[in-house]
Image: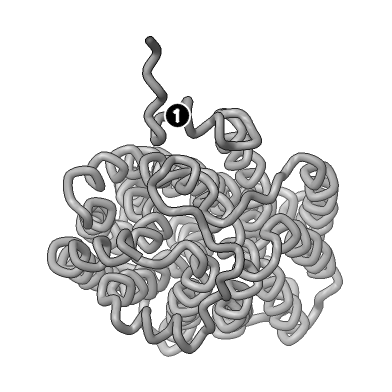
Amino acid sequence: MTSSPNPSSPAATSAKLPYSQRYPWVVVAMLWFICFFNYADRQAIFSIFPLLESELGFNKAQLGFIGAAFTWVYALSAPFAGQVGDRYPRKTVILAGLYVWSIITGFTALCSKVWHFAFVRAAEGLGETFYFPASMSLISDYHTRDTRSRAMSFHQTSVYAGTIGGGALAGWMGMHFGWQSPFILLGVAGVVLGLVLAKFIREPGRNEAEIAAGNVPEANPDAQPLDIAAFLRMLAATPTALALIVAFFGANFVGLVFLSWMPTFLKEKFELNLAVAGIGATVFIQVASMFGAMSGGWLADRWRKLRPGGRILVQAVGTLGGAPFIYFCGETQKLALLIPAMTAFGFFKGLYDANIWASLYDVVPAARRGTAVGIMNMIGWLGGGLGSISVGLAVTQGFGMSETIASTAAIYIVVAIVLTVAGLVFAPRDVQRASAT
């Protein structure tokens, strides 16, 4: 006599789904390459800031404004992008965004004035803002809560790889072929990638993997999407989600300070050439973040089984551990000490980054995951834009860049406190309520 399979076992789940057990990870891998260009395209501009300063006469306040133009439009359009991802096929949204932002990246090569760069960067932000709400929702429908952090942490490594690739490529090509050259190359490559992957990405049903695993009841096909006003009321009554959004604001403020200004910081403080500064500003932090993200995903999937706020507590460890190294990055006078400080900060940053969306998905309904990411992206990237422009304004007003960067360690400490309270106090009720819903 043979026993019937456990409905939540991998074999049973696979039998209910129209794809192999490997395909959910293939999806993550395909999205990995799209996200690589998402970040390479946005990072490239920062490595050629010194060239824009010397060739076009831009000052640091103007450069900060160029950097912030992307983040402000990216942020303000994020809630709309989230709703689009919840109402339309995520595959279509992702690929359309890839085509749009890649073409706009190519047009960056035609810019010559501050407002040109600000306009193109803002348009690129509009194109890129559709990616994360749709892609995170797509991944969450291929992975249950048991593997979600690992899947998203693997995807997160593309953020770091793209940041390294875009920064290093732009610095090297800018020095040898002119600052326009990397934007043309990245634009063409992104369009080609989209045309290739369009044949292989499949659109899943909403919450498909969880339904197949028996973790949640089958979706009602006649159910209407929750309108934005009702969703905002639900969000306001979920303190864990609010805490995660506040934390993302602070973490992104610090992250954009490093992304925007570290190439210029290294070139001016340690007198590195443009190519070395572009590589050095990204490779140590981002490679370490890859290891941190993979560790954070593995750890969070296990801590989540021990307590409802386990993923959030991994994020709290990441921000608290990273704070002292942010301070050291700004204040150290020796390049030999800066490198390990950047590496340690990158690792702890990865612990936080791995669970940004997985933590949020523990407390919001599956049908509104895109909107939830959109709203969180809006708040977080408003913080990022503030971080980018604040350093430029501070330096223009006579403050040292070293001290300005070091002072952002205090923000990471506040973020760690907010996350600890959310993980220990708010998460048990909110996670239980979301699971019941």
Q: Is residue 10 left or right of residue 173?
A: left
User: Disc 1 designates what residue?
Assistant: 10
Q: Can residue 82 be seen here?
A: yes
Q: Looking at the picture, does residue 255 appear above or below residue 28?
A: below
Q: Looking at the picture, does residue 99 appear above or below residue 8?
A: below
Give the quadrant of residue 363: bottom left
Q: Looking at the picture, does residue 98 appear above or below residue 73?
A: above
Q: Residue at x 37, y 76 (%)?
A: 400
Residue 164 in the image: state x and y as whole percent.
57, 48
The residue at the far front in this view is: 1
Q: Residue at x 78, y 62 (%)?
A: 96
The residue at the far top in this view is: 1
Q: Which of 86 and 122 is in front in this view?
A: 86
Q: Looking at the picture, does residue 19 appear above or below residue 347?
A: above
Residue 15 in the image: state x and y as whole percent.
55, 29
Q: Which of 193 and 176 is in front in this view?
A: 193
